[in-house]
Amino acid sequence: MALRNLAALPLFPANKAKRRRSPISLTPLIDVVFILLIFFMLASNVTDWRAISLNAPGEGAASAAIEGALLVEVRPKEIRLSGKPITLINLSATIAAAVRKKPTQRVMVKTATGVILQRAIVVLDALSAAGARNLSLHQ
């Protein structure tokens, strides 16, 4: 009889819930990811606050702006200062020297057709770093 009683017993415990693993709740993980997302959004600086001030020419001011101004031409493959090819480093040095002599020196930046905007911004940034404060942009 003892063998019959053993055979009647189930092989697995009666309470199957104790043997199963409980599923992992994703709520704490989602909370942590959301908090990290908010932290990085608040900690990062999305906008570059450096500004380059430009003078927009008026209707009759084109001839007045040209007189006495240094002309910087930005072309797709080169930069020119007063019609002569120049590197960006030499341009910065030349403009810095001109601004030291005359602080109100006008600098006109003319972009050619097909110039990438980033290239023009790099030139404007270099001119601004060289001390040019009277910049105007023409196309």
Image: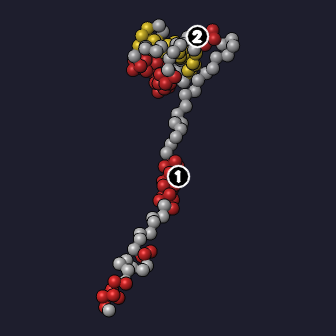
Mark 1 Cα-neighbour bin, 10 Å: few <14, some 14–19, many ≥20: few
Q: Residue at x 41, y 19 (%)?
A: 88
Mark 2 or mark 1, which is nearer the start of the sequence?
Answer: 1
Q: Is residue 24 above or below residue 124?
A: below
Asked whether the viewer can see residue 101, the reply is no
Q: Residue at x 50, y 51 (%)?
A: 37
Q: Secondary structure at mark 1?
A: helix
Residue 3 falls left or right of residue 100: left
Which residue bears the numbered disc 2?
A: 66
* Residue 79 falls in image quadrant: top left
Which residue bears the numbered disc 1?
A: 38
Q: Nearer the viewer, residue 67 or 45?
A: 45
Image coordinates for residue 48, horizontal then vertical, percent: 52, 36
Q: Residue at x 56, y 21 (%)?
A: 134
Image coordinates for residue 108, horizontal then vertical, percent: 55, 15
Residue 120 falls left or right of residue 18: right
